[in-house]
Image (cartoon, rainbow, N blue to C red):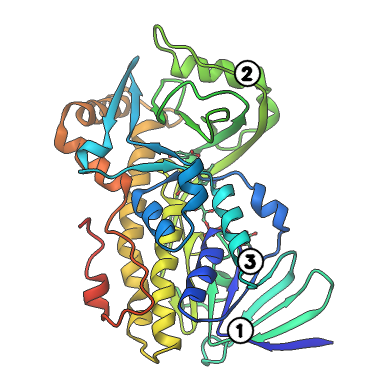
Amino acid sequence: MTVHERTQVGIVGAGPAGLLLSHLLALGGIDSVCVENRSRAYCEARQRAGMLESTTVDLLRAVGLGIRLDAEGLPHNGIYLQFDGERHRLDFRELTGGRQLMIYAQTEIVKDLIAARIAAGAALEFEVSDTSVAGFDSGRPVLRYTDARGERHEVRCDAIAGCDGFHGITRPSIPAGGLTMLAERSYPYAWLGILAAAPPSTDEVIYCRHDNGFALHSMRTPEVGRLYLQVPADEDINNWPDDRIWAELATRFALPSWALTSGPVLQKSITPMRSFVAAPMRHGRLFLAGDAAHIVPPTGAKGLNLAVADVTALATALVRLLRDGDPSLAAAYSDYCLERVWRSTHLSWWMTSMLHITPGQDQFESRLQLAQLRHLVTSKSAATMLAETYTGYAPLHYDPTTHLDAPALWGSTSAA
Ligand code: RFL
Ligand code: PHB
């Protein structure tokens, strides 16, 4: 038997994009149903991002999601760049006139969002299967899924949001020719990431270029470190017992009178590196957001921040479409988001290329990388360009009562 239901927005995926969209829509008086094929525990434990732009932090605070973030997040004012046996600090706060980053794990944002949605009595279904979307061309979109108890659901919607990540089903549901641009770059290396019960050996994130490959030292709490190593693209994680990981991290981060504190490895995984952008981010009444539409390599920490920016715009557009019958923001959604997406795609590609060692890399490439890094740590204007892009672009505002049109609201994503 199929249960027939009705909502205003059907959301596929309860990652940061889907959950935040559901939260923002509710603030604007719009109903949604959000379906997720994994369990709640899985979503809450999936280790991913950690570095939030100042614009993301401000948005989360403004929509009632800042309490634990402010109590437990670790404010950061800059980053370290390490190369050629030297470590240099870039003070992003000073370079940007006050913008501050925050380390607050994606797991914690997801926990906060799930708790807020459940407390608000939202329709949020975990462990669904056979999700499909249809009818977004006709203006009568339908979301179908089987719930955790095995019951089939057919939900009539006014719009569907594809927030189901890079491997989801919504983007592939767009008919041939619907996506007019698919741009992709894969990189010939991957990141081995660990979560470790080891107090961070640094106060701010270290991006390190070493002849053996890139390394990144980040953190989650004052007791838990998050560290990454560049490894070959097809690397088998079994080649990396914990002792080898710590030894390689110590080699790449080595500096006189500095030591890396090691500790038990709580989790480890290998992530491929890819840039991908699909456009437009809208097909009829189907709107793509977050990793469903675009992914970036993690160098530069842009993925989660882009997902937050997308759904902030999408929520505004959907409130205007569904509550006020005004389609203008929905029409402008894709172009508006793509400007930011391409700036972040550039930043993450640039940081990736500058800091990783390509297999077979020659002296010419190595010298260019070192020249760029040297420029960043000696030129205030070069450092400011990185600082502005890394910390975020134009502020993200969510005001569901606004009646501004697209040019006034979204004239440009440039930093204000
Ligand atoms: P998600 O998080 O992938 O969520 C999509 C959700 O959709 C579900 N799903 C389905 N549900 C129902 N039916 C289906 N058929 C479905 N198919 C899929 C999935 O189970 C999932 O729950 O996408 P979203 O919400 O767009 O969020 C994007 C972010 O997760 C991602 O961009 C970031 O994690 C990227 N990223 C980083 N971003 C940052 O901004 N700062 C960072 O410091 C940062 N570090 C990282 C990262 C990503 C990493 N990895 C592992 C890719 C570090 C790493 C190592
Ligand atoms: C993280 O904390 O996981 C992190 C930080 C900065 C990055 C990527 C990941 O560029």
**Which sits earlier in the primary sequence, circle 1 or circle 3?**
3
Q: Which residue is mark 3?
A: 119
Could you tell whether 374 is left or right of 171 in the image?
Answer: left
Q: Specify the quadrant of the image occupied by residue 238.
A: top right
Seen in the picture, residue 22 relative to 2 is either above or below; the reply is: above
Measured Cα–Cα span from mark 2 to mark 3: 45 Å
Q: Within 10 Å of the Cα at label 3, are there few (<14), some (14-19), or many (20+) other Cα atoms?
A: few
Residue type of the residue flagged with mark 2: Arg
Q: Quadrant of the N terminus?
A: bottom right
Where on the picture, by quarter, is residue 410? bottom left
**Residue, x 32% and y 60% (percent of image)?**
340
- The kind of residue on which mark 3 rests is Ala
* Residue drawn where x is 45% and y is 46% of the image: 70
Left or right of 335 on screen, residue 12: right
Q: Could you tell me which secondary element the residue under label 3 belongs to?
A: helix
Task: Provide residue 29's location: percent of width, then percent of height.
Answer: 49, 81
Above or below, 344 against 24 in this view is above
Q: Quadrant of residue 373?
A: top left
Q: Which residue is at a point 33% across and 57% down the rendered structure image?
A: 342
For the point 55% across and 85% down, which residue is it?
Answer: 8
Task: Tell me the quarter of the image containing the C terminus.
Answer: bottom left
Q: Are marks 2 and 1 in contact (CB under 8 Å)?
A: no
Res 400 visible: yes
| Amino acid type indicated by mark 1 | Ala
Residue at label 1? 134
Q: Which residue is mark 2?
A: 244
Task: For marks 2 and 1, give the CA distance.
Answer: 49 Å
Q: How many marks?
A: 3
Earlier along the polypeptide chain: callout 2 or callout 1? 1
